Image (spheres, helix red, strand yellow):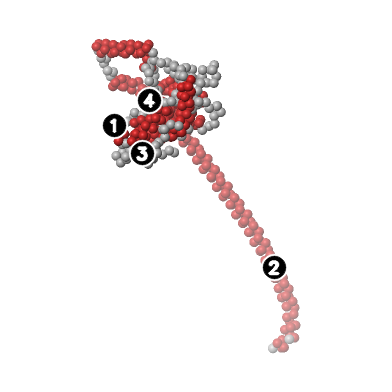
């Protein structure tokens, strides 16, 4: 887990994820599992939202992922991988599997406010400074374009881009999670940026498209 | 990871490291030196950076269970904890460094405690394994004996059947031979009777023929 701000003092003496998972494995300790859920719920929620582009579906997926983690808790081998690596792997596999299934819930942009004003939903905290209405609308529009562009990426590219750019994992960690060579992960990352640039340029009508005549001179990633 | 000397442009892998600040300082310096003289790579890098910036436009709302922001109170707590730790460390170091634990003695004590328990567990597991082996052996012997008895019974039945078949054949041959001999006897008896009759007739006619017609023959 990554936190850019000062962690609470109690975290200094808190058990590690692996220690908590050991308790869950040995005795199904609900307290230890609850602590793991508390620690990882937000990162998983963000991951699933980025991968699916749907905050509501991501909530469902996070619950399913934790249920899966508890059900298959004996499969975790602390000598083979860190808990975070195993968790990311389970989350990615489950989300990819879910994305291949039809989803009956209505797709909704991840960062749009909930339609029910009485229900705060997952976005309970209001922004600190409210932007002007036109600026807010422009932000929402740009955000939606990016969300759609990311959602349209191939699965392998989308996972790497989300883990690196949004979740902040290093390329080495992503390679461990996906069980891929590190070079492949880096190459796919630049391919993902290429694909996104083309889609965003079309969508936003900006000058982000690659200039003419560039092909053949630079090493151009192959897009599967 | 260094740029390949054979290629004009650094590989996408190196640019990925560069974009996300994972390149080693020497590699980063070489990439920046290449960038200064390569407008193609400058355009490519600018495009990637622009895409990265666009990605940041997709902001997610604060999650429900996000941690509260660190406050000044938290910072003060950290500072107090750091002071306390420093003070304790300094004081402790002044007093006396604790003697390091005798790991060898500790290991020996633990081994001494564990050895009987491990021995009992090993013996129990060994007994269990031996019992299982004996049971499997007995089952194998029983199965072998049963198979041998079944095979023997089958052989006996086959031999008896062959014997009965040979006996039936012998009786049949004997009956056939008897019938043939009886037929021969009847035929022979009839032939003997007929011959005897002919001889009697011949004897009746022989003197007349011998006295009356002997000279004709001569």
| Quarter of the picture holding the C terminus of chain B | bottom right
The quarter holding residue B123 reads: top left
Which residue in the structure is indicated by mark 2? B187
Spot occupied by residue B59 in the image (x, y as percentages of width and height): 44, 24
Answer few, some or many: residues within 10 Å of disc 1's Cα (few below 14, many 20 plus, some between 14 and 19): few
**CA gap, disc 1 and disc 2:** 134 Å
Spot occupied by residue A38 in the image (x, y as percentages of width and height): 45, 19
Spot occupied by residue A160 in the image (x, y as percentages of width and height): 42, 31
Q: Closer to the camera, B215 or A141?
A: A141
**CA gap, disc 2 and disc 3:** 124 Å
The reply to whether callout 1 and callout 2 are in contact (CB within 8 Å) is no
The reply to whether callout 3 and callout 4 are in contact (CB within 8 Å) is no
Mark 1 or mark 4: name the one nearer the start of the chain: 1
Q: For the residues carrying marks 3 and 4, which lies nearer the camera in this image?
A: 3
Mark 1 or mark 2: name the one nearer the start of the chain: 1
Q: Are marks 1 and 2 on the same chain?
A: yes
**CA gap, disc 3 and disc 4:** 69 Å
Q: Residue at x 50, y 31 (%)?
A: A99
Which residue in the structure is indicated by mark 3? A218
Judged from the image, the secondary structure of the residue bearing numbered disc 3 is loop
Answer few, some or many: residues within 10 Å of disc 2's Cα (few below 14, many 20 plus, some between 14 and 19): few
């Amino acid at each position: 887990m990554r936190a850019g701000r000062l962690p609470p003092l109690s975290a200094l003496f808190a058990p590690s994820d692996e220690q908590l998972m050991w308790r869950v494995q040995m005795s199904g300790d609900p307290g230890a599992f609850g602590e793991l859920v508390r620690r990882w719920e937000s990162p998983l929620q963000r991951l699933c939202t980025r991968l699916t582009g749907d905050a509501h579906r991501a909530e469902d997926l996070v619950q399913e992922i934790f249920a899966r983690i508890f059900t298959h808790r004996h499969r975790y081998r602390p000598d083979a991988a860190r808990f975070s690596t195993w968790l990311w792997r389970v989350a990615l596999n489950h989300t990819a599997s879910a994305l291949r299934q039809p989803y009956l819930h209505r797709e909704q942009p991840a960062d749009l406010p909930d339609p029910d004003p009485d229900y705060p939903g997952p976005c309970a905290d209001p922004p600190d400074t409210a932007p002007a209405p036109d600026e807010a609308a422009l932000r929402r529009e740009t955000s939606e374009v990016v969300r759609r562009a990311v959602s349209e990426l191939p699965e392998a590219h989308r996972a790497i881009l989300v883990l690196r750019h949004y979740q902040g994992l290093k390329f080495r960690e992503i390679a461990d999670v996906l069980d891929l060579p590190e070079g492949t992960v880096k190459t796919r990352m630049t391919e993902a940026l290429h694909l996104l640039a083309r889609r965003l340029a079309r969508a936003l009508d900006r000058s982000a498209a690659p200039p003419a005549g560039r092909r053949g001179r630079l090493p151009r990633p192959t897009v599967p | 990871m260094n740029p390949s000397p054979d290629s004009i442009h650094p590989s996408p892998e190196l640019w990925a490291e560069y974009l996300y600040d994972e390149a080693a300082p020497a590699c980063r310096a070489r990439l920046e030196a290449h960038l200064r003289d390569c407008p193609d790579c400058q355009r490519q890098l600018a495009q990637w950076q622009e895409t990265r910036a666009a990605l940041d436009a997709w902001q997610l709302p604060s999650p429900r269970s996000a941690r509260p922001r660190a406050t000044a109170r938290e910072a003060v707590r950290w500072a107090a904890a750091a002071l306390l730790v420093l003070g304790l460390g300094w004081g402790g170091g002044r007093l006396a460094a604790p003697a390091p634990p005798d790991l060898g003695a500790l290991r020996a004590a633990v081994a001494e405690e564990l050895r009987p328990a491990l021995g009992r567990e090993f013996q129990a597991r060994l007994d269990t394994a031996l019992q299982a082996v004996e049971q499997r052996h007995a089952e194998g012997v029983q199965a072998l004996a049963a198979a041998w008895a079944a095979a023997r019974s089958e052989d006996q039945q086959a031999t008896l059947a062959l014997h009965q078949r040979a006996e039936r054949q012998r009786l049949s041959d004997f009956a056939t031979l008897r019938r043939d001999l009886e037929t021969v006897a009847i035929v022979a008896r009839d032939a003997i009777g007929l011959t005897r009759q002919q001889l009697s007739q011949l004897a009746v006619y022989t003197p007349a023929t011998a006295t009356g017609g002997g000279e004709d023959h001569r």
